[in-house]
Image (cartoon, helix red, strand yellow):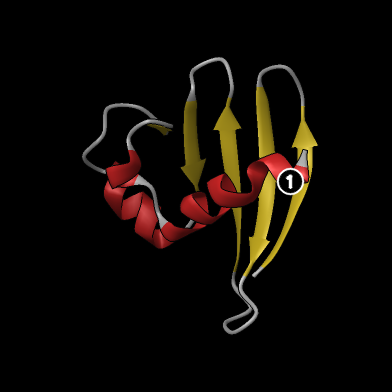
């Protein structure tokens, strides 16, 4: 996976993640004010259909896709 931080301000930060094997790319967005995270991959879209808001709480690891999990593993190194 290729990962890079693409934007940040006081309210949110975005990360770009690209798969080396499939060439698919996704944007992971952290909403700092709401303490939520979202991804535009199909897996996350499927998981969030049962949720009441656009992202999942950072503490709700059960509903994180693999892209969110990977970003959380290395997020501090990218700051």
Going by the image, does 55 lie left or right of 7?
Answer: left
Residue 78 appears at what percent x and percent y? 76, 45
* Residue 40, visible in the rendered structure: no
Residue 11 appears at what percent x and percent y? 66, 18
- Which residue is depicted at the point 37% across and 51% down? 45
Q: Which quadrant is the N terminus positioned in?
A: bottom right
Q: Is residue 34 above or below residue 8?
A: above
- Which residue is depicted at the point 34% across and 42% down? 61
- Which residue is depicted at the point 68% across and 33% down? 13
Going by the image, does 39 lie left or right of 76?
Answer: left
- Secondary element type, mark 1: helix
Within 10 angstroms of label 1, few (less than 14), some, or many (20 or more) residues? few
* Residue 62, visible in the rendered structure: yes
Q: Which residue is mark 1?
A: 77
- Which residue is depicted at the point 31% across and 45% down? 63
Q: In the displayed image of the protein, which residue is found farthest to the bottom?
A: 21
Q: In the displayed image of the protein, which residue is found farthest to the left?
A: 50
């Amino acid at each position: 996976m290729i990962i890079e931080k693409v934007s940040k301000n006081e309210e949110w930060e975005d990360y770009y993640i690209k798969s080396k094997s499939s060439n698919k790319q996704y944007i992971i967005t952290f909403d700092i004010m709401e303490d939520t995270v979202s991804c535009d991959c199909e897996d996350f879209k499927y998981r969030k259909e049962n949720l009441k808001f656009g992202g999942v709480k950072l503490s709700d690891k059960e509903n994180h896709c693999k892209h969110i999990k990977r970003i959380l593993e290395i997020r501090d190194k990218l700051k």
